[in-house]
Amino acid sequence: MGLVIQKFGGTSVSNVEKIQNVANRVIEEKNKGNDCIVVVSAMGKSTDQLVGLAKEISTAPNKREMDMLLTTGEQITISLLAMALSEKGYPAVSLTGWQAGIKTEPVHGNARIVDIDTTRLKKELSEGMIVIVAGFQGITEDGAISTLGRGGSDTTAVALAVALKADKCDIYTDVNGVYTTDPRFVKGARKLSSVSYDEMLELAHLGAGVLHPRAVEFAKNYNIPLEVRSSSERESGTIIKEEVNMEQNLIVRGIAFEDEITRVTVVGLPNSLTGLSVIFSELANNHINVDIIIQNTLAEQSTNLSFSIKNDDLEGTIKVLENVREQLKYSRIESETGLAKVSIVGSGMVSNPGVAAEMFDVLAANGILVKMVSTSEIKVSTVIEQDKMLKAIEALHSAFNLSGAPIES
Amino acid sequence: MGLVIQKFGGTSVSNVEKIQNVANRVIEEKNKGNDCIVVVSAMGKSTDQLVGLAKEISTAPNKREMDMLLTTGEQITISLLAMALSEKGYPAVSLTGWQAGIKTEPVHGNARIVDIDTTRLKKELSEGMIVIVAGFQGITEDGAISTLGRGGSDTTAVALAVALKADKCDIYTDVNGVYTTDPRFVKGARKLSSVSYDEMLELAHLGAGVLHPRAVEFAKNYNIPLEVRSSSERESGTIIKEEVNMEQNLIVRGIAFEDEITRVTVVGLPNSLTGLSVIFSELANNHINVDIIIQNTLAEQSTNLSFSIKNDDLEGTIKVLENVREQLKYSRIESETGLAKVSIVGSGMVSNPGVAAEMFDVLAANGILVKMVSTSEIKVSTVIEQDKMLKAIEALHSAFNLSGAPIES
């Protein structure tokens, strides 16, 4: 008995049959006597199709209109799921982001949730309705439809769990848990029974793809345990929570990766106190996420600054840099696309200084040139050529003993 | 200089290329110095695809959820058109029904507009924006998304023209005007340069398909002249207005038709004062539109009552009738699907009593059995087998001298 939030991703609702399956999973929770809120994404590849339409019209579509466009995807899923539940005799009501009271900052494409007005949600629950909420979307103060960015449905689910003090927040996906690396790409990948928020954060940030980083942060801040589990199988998944029994002898817990990376280099940037701050403030103001940043200030008049972004942000980044050219007086911009990031992650890494060196050894032995490196307490990231990404993952997965029997921590 | 409402139907926005074309038509009006509001439908067959998804889930999908589902179609079009205009350097903003202030009665699937709060629309226009409004949709008092029924985008356009006292309301479609019958089906069909509201009303009601009847009613009540014209060609279309120069020698002005008709017969209905009222009130309460009604009360204890509905409403109709069975004590319900309605329309008909007889002659000569008949001052409707519909239209079009040179009234 309690309030359960269930989130189903795009692959779990990619056709009517799968939506029926989701309805059955929801009914199972309802029949246990729980109040149920279900958050769903757009069906399968429908978001990509909508993006494709917009790209036919503009290489950089108006962001407000992009949100207007993309939010239709979740609206389709919520209505179909509510119909399926009604048809099975379980009263359900679908709510768009604005109807569910999900308020965001006045940003398009990557807005943060600022508040959830739970009045409507509580009213529907009190009437025994199963409430289906469109993930990924909200409304700005002046009534515009906004989106939380790709993967934002996870954030919607966790934010609802926080706002309504849910007893459980289950993230259903097409894999049955969090793996040592993405099992869709690496056959030897193994399931972890639990991971810490921080490990998950690194894994999610680095493209493991099962859970959106902002959702993990949100869950960590409010200490909401999440379970990542399969929408098609019944077995338990991976629990993400604060305390995890670590396997001391498994230093690297997972290999994360992300493709479509571009490296941008600002060549001949005069040494100054404010240069970096100007560039990265302006990029942030334009909602361009920068990942790895590398700068070595040598004893010269000027320096080269490199950073990595998603391919899609290259055009925007160049615009930003050109706007500050006169102010910063750098000589030119270089960029290299076709790159990928591969990272090793594990909480045990902090006390094992040789791990990074081992990673570079493995990559070198496989003829893979490392173009950028970034390290933190629990991860080492490298940027390499995208067409060598898979080779790198497989080599690292094997070298760090991640292949083999399921990992029960 | 003034305010122009332009409405583009689904076939005019069925792909990105056509949306670009619509953007150009809008820019032409804007460049004349006009304020522009553009109402668009869902892209091509997208509404049918959404209906198909819903029907996979339920034979009678929840109507609130159906509205939630279908309104995504127009939302996609408005965002793409706004993007296209922005890309061409014309600031545009898209508004869903609720954002545009279109308030409807609390009904799903076939709601009427009760009010338009024009604050937002006026604000955007005053800032020089081209405003793109999602047709077909509105919002109920309690915040649910509602729809105006199929073809409701026409109603949206006319309602906006009324609310904002527009100078012009152009309905762009895939034909270049109103024809003597649907030119997609009958090669000899000819364009009319103008028709009266009443004639258009009969033509629209009867399925000519270029303009929604509620929109014509609306325009008639507020005396807003409409122009039906082609979205791909530049020539002028058909003007719908109060006064039309009639060609006295052309009694029948058009042939209208509608398929997917079902005839329902209530057999053995005891004669009573309230029987008819009970049945049709209940059907109306359930938002089932009844078209032709036939009853002959003979000198017997009971009678047979027949009426025609759309095929889709059969299930709902039978439910309604079964609910009143105990009260009305009729013996059984019969129904026949696979029917079509074919009608002749013309204001001159009222003074020419032989027209109906001539119609029956033509049908009989072509071996077409008339199953129901209904007449008014300006039309005669017959219900026949659907697979003989096209044959009937062609025979009537030819018999009433509608084929030939363009009709310039």
Image: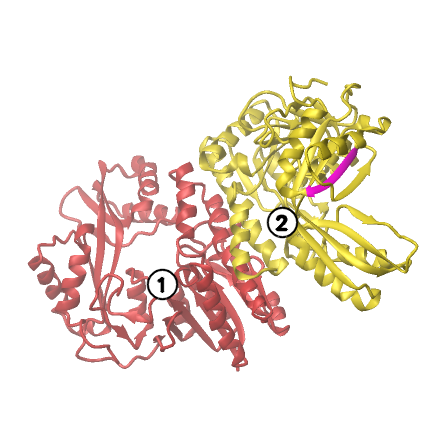
Chain colours: A yellow, B red
A304 up-or-down from B35: above or below: above
Chain of the residue where label 1 is placed in the rendered structure: B
* Most distant residue in the left direction: B365
Q: Pick whichever, B209 or A383, lies toward us.
A: A383
Q: Residue at x 31, y 74 (%)?
A: B196
Q: Which residue is mark 2?
A: A98
Main SS, magenta region, reads strand
Q: Nearer the viewer, mark 2 or mark 1?
A: 2
Query: Which image quarter is the N terminus of chain A in?
Result: top right
**Horizontally, is B294 left or right of A19 in the view?**
left
Q: CA distance from mark 2 to mark 1?
A: 33 Å
Same chain assignment for discs 2 and 1: no
B282 up-or-down from B81: above or below: above
x, y percentage for residue B406?
Answer: 24, 77
Count of number-bearing discs: 2
**Horizontally, is A315 left or right of B346 in the view?**
right
x, y percentage for residue B57?
Answer: 42, 37
Q: Pick whichever, A329 or A319, lies toward us.
A: A329
Give the magenta range. Answer: A379-384
B349 up-or-down from A66: above or below: below
Chain of the residue where label 2 is placed in the rendered structure: A
x, y percentage for residue A281?
Answer: 81, 56
Q: Pick whichever, B63 or B13, lies toward us.
A: B13
Give the residue type that dot 1 points to. Pro
Does residue B73 show up magenta in the picture? no
Give the residue type that dot 2 points to. Trp
Q: Residue at x 55, y 47 (%)?
A: A47
Q: Residue at x 66, y 22 (%)?
A: A403
> Secondary structure beneath disc 1?
helix
**Horizontally, is B69 left or right of A339 in the view?**
left
Q: Which residue is mark 1?
A: B213
> Secondary structure beneath disc 2?
loop
